Amino acid sequence: MSRRFLKLDAPQATALLLGLITLLHLAAGARVGLTGDAAHYALYGAKLAWSYFDHPPMIGWLQATVEPFSTANLALRLWPIALGTLSGAALYRLARRLYPERTPWLGFVAVAVMQSAVILSLMGISMLPDDPLLLFFLLAAGALHRTLIEDEPRAWLWVGLWFGLAGLSKYTAVALVFSAIWLMISERRWAHLRTRWPWLGILIALLAILPVLGWNAAHDWVSFRYQILHVSDPDRHWRLMHFVKSQLIQFFSYSPGIYLFGLIALVHALRRRDDPRNRLLLAMTVPVFVIIDGSSGTTVSLPHWTAVAWAVLSIGIAAWLLDHWRRRAVRIGAAASGVYSVLLIGVLLSELIHPWIPFKANAYPLADLYGWRRAATQAETLRAQMAATPGTRPMLYAGNWSYASHIAWYAYPQPVQITDRKMHQMTLWYGNAADGGRGILVVPQQFHGHVPAWTAKFARCAPAGDLPIPLEGKVATTYYFYRCEGYHG
C-alpha cells in the first residue's frame, strides 16, 4: 500500500486527498443535526423564491434539488460536501493553469493548504452561501486568467457565466468586478472593449443575476439596503479592537501558518508584481480583504467571509513554500501549521462522528447540533394542546432568527415567529408577532439567560416543561418551553 502511494502522481494524490476528506465529511455529516445557518438555508429550499432577504438564491435552489427526495441531515449536507470537493479540484486546475511550467505537485500543495484551513473543513459539512461562491470564484479566477493574462477575448463569455453564478451565491461576488477592473488596467487589455466579447460577458452576468434584481425591486431593495447597512452603518463607529478581533479569529480559524504564510505570499506578490500571475493573485484577493476586513472595524467579521481570498491565496502560499523549502524555518513553520490543522480538524470531525470529549451537564460545546428535531416535535405538541383551548390561533415563538430557523425547519411547515420586531427573512415568511398573540416560546439552554427579556414581551408566561437531551450518559443540553399569552412586543 505504501509503495503504491509513493508511486502516485500529483493529480492522483490530489484526488486521493479530496476523496479521503469527502469520506470524513460524509461520516461526520451523518451523525449530527444542522447548524442554525444550515437550517435557515434548508428553509430556503423549502420556500423557493427568486431571492431572499439576507442572501441571493443559489443555496436555496441547490437544496431544493435534494429536499423532494430526502430531508435527512446527511442529505442536506450533500451539496456542501460536493461543492468542497469540486472547489478543491478547481483550485488544483487553477494552480496548474497559473504555473504550467512548474511541478504539478504545486497544485497538490495548494489543495493541501486550502484543505488544512480549519474553517474550510467545517464549511464542507454545513451549507453556507460561501460554498457555491468558492467554486464559482475559483472558476472565475481561471476565466480571468485566460481572458486578461493569456489574452483570449472569447473567454469573457466564461467570465460572465462564473461572475453571474457567483452573484447568485453571495453578494461578496461584487469583489470580482473590482478584480476584473484591476486586471484590465494592469494588463492594458483595452482592445478587448472594441470587441463584442466583454459586452456579451457582461450581458450573461446580468441575465444570471436578474432573479436577484427582480426580487429586490419587488421588495423595496430590502436585501441591498440590509447588506449596505451591514458594512457602512453610520451608527457604528470603526474600532481598532473589532478589526484586531476579526484578524485573530481568522488567524486561528484558518491556522496560524496559513495566516502568516499568506501574508508573506501577499507581500511577495506585491514586490514581484511584474509577474502577471502575481498580479492575478493580488487582483483576486485584495478586493475581498479590503471589503471584508475593512468593514470589520464596525462589525466583527466571521472567518468564512474571506474564504474565497484565502483559497486563491493558497496557490501563492504553495509557490512560495516550494521556492523556500530549503530553509529550515520554513519547513518547521509548515510542519507546525500542518500539525495544528490535523489535530484541530481531527478533534472536531472525530467528535462529530463519535462524541468523546468530556463535558459538564448542560454545557456540551457542540450542543447546538443536538435535539432540535425532538424540541420542535414537543413544541408543536404543546402548541396543538393550546389550540384546543379558547383564544387566537397559537404560534411557535423563538427569541432570535438563528435558532428560530432550527425550530421552523424541524417543525415545518408550522410558522415560527420571533419575539422582536426586527426585519428578518423569517418576517417575510411568517410575519411579525401579532399584538395579543399567544403560543409556545422555545428556549434552548444556551439562551436560557434571555428568558426574562423574552417572556417580558408577553402579558403572561408560564413554564410548560423542559426536554433534556442525553449524550453519552450526560445531559448535553436542555430545551425549555413556556406557554405565553398577550404578546405586546
Image (cartoon, rainbow, N blue to C red):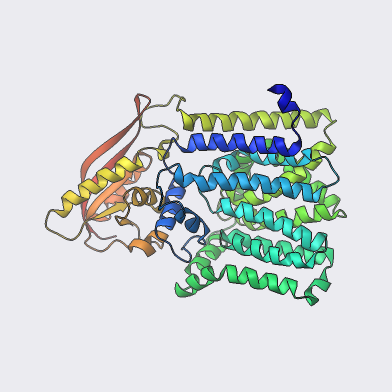
- In the rendered image, residue 58, in percent from the top left (x then y), is placed at 52, 59
Q: In screen coordinates, is 32 left or right of 153?
A: left
Q: In screen coordinates, is 244 left or right of 410?
A: right
- In the rendered image, residue 401, in percent from the top left (x then y), is placed at 40, 53
Front-most of residues 443 and 213: 213
Residue sitting at 35 percent across and 38 percent down? 371
- In the rendered image, residue 51, in percent from the top left (x then y), is placed at 48, 65
Front-most of residues 211 and 415: 211
Residue sitting at 70 percent across and 67 percent down? 157
> Residue pushed farthest left?
390
Q: Is residue 88 visible?
A: yes
Q: In the rendered image, which quarter contains the C terminus?
A: bottom left
Front-most of residues 336 and 233: 336
Q: Is residue 181 visible?
A: no
Residue sitting at 70 percent across and 29 percent down? 336
- In the rendered image, residue 475, in percent from the top left (x then y), is placed at 34, 29
Q: Quadrant of residue 319?
A: top right
448 in relation to 425, above or below: above
339 in relation to 133, above or below: above
68 in relation to 361, above or below: below
Residue sitting at 66 percent across and 28 percent down? 339
Q: In the rendered image, which quarter contains the N terminus?
A: top right
